[in-house]
Image (cartoon, rainbow, N blue to C red):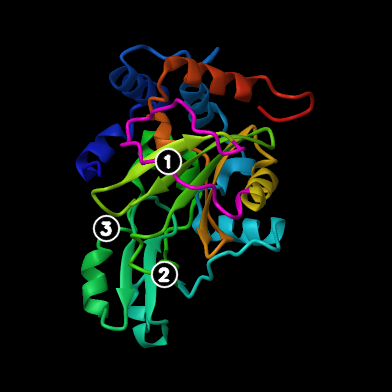
Amino acid sequence: MMRTTLRQLLGPVPDPLVRHVMYRRRFGRWGDFRRPTRFTEVLTRRMLAERTQQIAWTCDKTRMKEYAARTCPQLQVPATLWRGREVDDLNVSDLPERWVIKPNHASGMVAFGDRSTTVKALRGTTRGWLRTYDRAALGEWAYRWADHSLIVEPDLSRDRGRDLVDYKFYVFHGRVKMLHRSSGRFTAGHGERFYSPDWRILDLYNGVTQEPEAPRPTSLAEMIAHAEALGGGFGFMRVDFYEIDGVPWFGELTPYPSGGMDPFEPEEVDLEMGRWWMDAPEGSLR
């Protein structure tokens, strides 16, 4: 995580300058954010220019769950067991055997709890979680509008997150164009593999160790339908799910995958994804 002092230093620096420097350092070239052709460039342009109410709520976990439940009533959405700012207000004895706590306004932070977890331990675990998320200081505008709070949800996994598999669908103008399966997210064995919507392996690499070929998920068709419904109002949205016992569960919406810093190699893939976004059907959103 970025140091607080550096985040404060970036405060007066214009977002375009920050993103230009970040892009140059990550990809070894200057990005064109005015006339973008690559997906990574269009995604950066979203951060700099797409600042509307339509996308402002998409980094707020509570609001995205409400949107998923409203848009796809048949989709399983994790319940919010508690929401607040002070863990001292949380009665652990009211929670189920296993649960997770995470910030409502940030990504990548999660802690697993059970009946043995104490409020004192949670104070230490969640220290600093309510601060402004560093990604907001790097131009990921929607994070600025998420409510700063903590939420508790049921632990859907069988082994503290280790057996949960993420299915992440890339939706362009209401159509799933590709997805990737991510396993072992909370372990050293984290791996990913990209697939087409009909579950063919894609020759695509984005810096994460590639996992072995996996079997087609039972609920693939359902997840695609839900992803297209949830992502249909955007030029692009990544929609994430879990599959548990053959049933899809909503994970989250991701308007800024990896903050635009995924390499998407070979380069032609980045260009093709850029065309999917920019070649908008008539009347649809860019």
Which residue is most to the bottom? Answer: 93
Query: Horizontal and vertical percent for residue 5?
Result: 20, 41
- The residue indicated by pointer 3 is 128
Q: Where are the magenta residues, as a range? A: 197-220
Q: Residue at x 43, y 16 (%)?
A: 267
Prevailing secondary structure class for the magenta stretch in the rendered image: loop
What's the CA distance linking mark 2 and mark 1?
26 Å
Res. 33 visible in picture: no
Earlier sequence position, callout 3 versus callout 1:
3
Q: Nearer the viewer, residue 43 or 52?
A: 43
The image quadrant of residue 64 is bottom right
Q: Disc 3 residue type?
A: Gly
Other-residue count near label 3 (Cα within 10 Å), few / some / many at <14 / 14–19 / ≥20: few
Q: Residue furthest right?
A: 283
Spatial distance from mark 2 to mark 3, Cα to Cα? 22 Å
Give the residue displayed 40% in from the left and 51% down from the top.
106
- Secondary structure category for the residue under label 1: loop
Residue kind at label 2, given as amino acid type? Asp
Asked if the residue at tag 3 contacts the one at tag 2, i.e. Cβ–Cβ closer than 8 Å, the answer is no
258 left or right of 282 in image: left
The dot on residue 155 is 2
The circle drawn on residue 213 is: 1
Secondary structure under tag 3 reads: loop
Q: Quadrant of residue 96?
A: bottom left
Q: Determine the residue positioned at 24% across, 65% down.
A: 125
- Circle nearer the viewer, 2 or 3: 2
State the quadrant of the C terminus: top right
